[in-house]
Structures are given as C-alpha cells and as structure tokens.
Image: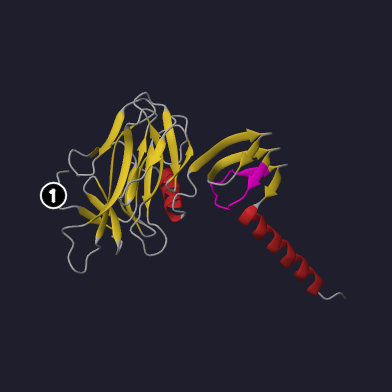
Amino acid sequence: MTSQQAPQIFQRHRIANYLVDGKLCNTFAIGALGTAEDFFLLGVEQPGETHEPMITANLLGADGKVLCRLVRNMITANPGQCRKVFDEQIGYEIHDRDGNTIFAVRTRRDANAGADDPAFVMVLSGRFHDRQGKQVAQLSLAGADEFIDETLPAAFGFDGNFGLSRQLSEDAAVVARLMMMTRGATHQVIRGSITQQAFTLDGAIVHNAQFNGCKLRLTSGEFAVFGESNAFNDCHFDFYGPAGNVRNLMMELMKASARAVPTA
C-alpha cells in the first residue's frame, strides 16, 4: 500500500484503530496463531477509553529462530535477548541484542479524520520471518512498501465476527477468535498427549489435548479449551492468585449450599 491510497475499513473502533497493510481495523491477527515456534502478530483493543496499542506476537529472526514473544505488550520469552524501548511517543520498539529495531508500534493522530471519525491510528513496522527464515510480511510506520504474504493466515476487524479473513482453517479461526476475545491473554495452543509433566495452563488454548498424570498450575484463570477429545486424567491442579480466589469462593458456596439442603 502507498500512503496516498484510502484504507479498507473493518469494524472500526470509535477512538483508535490499527492501520495494517492498507486495512483500518479495531483488531487484527496474522501468521501461525498460537504457535510457540513460528511467527504470528496480534493487535487488539485495550479495555477502556484509550488509544494505546496492545500487541501479542512471536517475533523471529531471518534464521527462523524465535527472538522474543510479546504477550499484551510484555516480553515473556526472550531467547534473542531483546529489549523493549520507549520514547516520548505513544508506543514502543523492540530491539535485538545488537540494538537493531525489529518491531515498532506507534499511535499517531489521523490527519485525515473528520469530526465524527476516530482521531488516532496505530501503525506498525518490521520485517517478519517464519520458522523457515522466509520473510512473510513487512509493515511500515509510513504505510509504504507493505505486504503480507497471501498464503499467511490473517483476519482484520472483529466484533464477534471477522471483518475480513483469509487462509484460516476452521480450527485456526477458533484460535483467532479466542485470542481476540481474551485480548491476547490466551496465546499458545496445546495439542496432543502430555504425560507426567508440570504444566502452567495460564495463556493456554487447549485443543484436543490429553493430560495424563500431570501437575497443572492455574493462576490468572486465563485459558481456553475447545475440541472433542480433551482429557485430564489423574491430574493434580494447583490454584493460585485470581484462579485460587475463584476456587475458594466456589468451595465455600458449595459448602453453604450443602448446609442449606433440608434433611428428611
């Protein structure tokens, strides 16, 4: 897209929207969503009245190796020793260990906005590679020379339904919806058989997974389950933080309910 072209609009937010490859939208997702080893990029609305971005992403280098993972703007995995850098603008940059900018997101005023239009746009920049090292997308703060590989799964705009989606399988569409609805809090898909492991469910999207004899930890309560063949066999659950509070409340309510049942 060139900066002179009018963007396509999908599910526009009333305050601020992402401008991604010529598409203006409240939310977007591209890449192998929910994977730990491949590229994906998710931008969602912040809760409340704000024009700040909220990004969850897996960023890879040109060698196909993971540099870092962002979850709701926070670096949560960092094999590439990346740094998050702020300046006077709204947004931030991610620098690699050598100080090179590998990703940036900024909020700016939309000079073309009318009186009744959203006043802010959130723009991104970076060259994005998949696990084979192929460059699959390029975004620019100026909006020029952008592209997203046509084979890459993508969705733009979300209000319960996508404004535009492409190359999304049925399961990938479910993952995209879950990631968007939880604003990136759920971001890693878990599949297959997992036996006798300690595992944290926070952030997980459990899809046709079988946990056998595992020790499972839950703190935030932010996880999702879908599919027809999920199982938790002989597993031990530990609840902490908000999840522990909910568990304790439910236990007390169940005890109170049992005491209230009249006996014959």
Name the side, left or right, on which 4 lies relative to 107.
left
Image quadrant for the N terminus?
top left
Q: Count residues near mark 1 (Cα–Cα under 10 Å), then give few for <14, some for 14-19, many for 20+.
A: few
Q: Residue furthest right?
A: 264
Instruction: Check the image and report above or below for 40 versus 111.
Output: above
Name the side, left or right, on which 109 lies relative to 263.
left
Image quadrant for the C terminus?
bottom right
Q: Residue at x 55, y 52 (%)?
A: 222
Q: Which residues are magenta?
A: 216-232
Residue 131 point in image, percent of width and height:
39, 28
Q: Residue at x 31, y 27 (%)?
A: 134
Q: Quadrant of residue 171?
A: top left
Residue indicated by mark 1: 5
Q: Residue furthest front?
A: 88
Q: Amino acid at mark 1?
A: Gln
Q: Quadrant of residue 146?
A: top left
Residue 15 point in image, percent of width and height:
30, 63
Instruction: Check the image and report above or below for 12 versus 178.
Output: below
Name the side, left or right, on which 98 lies relative to 210.
left
Residue 205 point in image, percent of width and height:
52, 45
For the residue labelled by badge 1, is the local secondary structure a helix, a strand or a loop?
A: loop
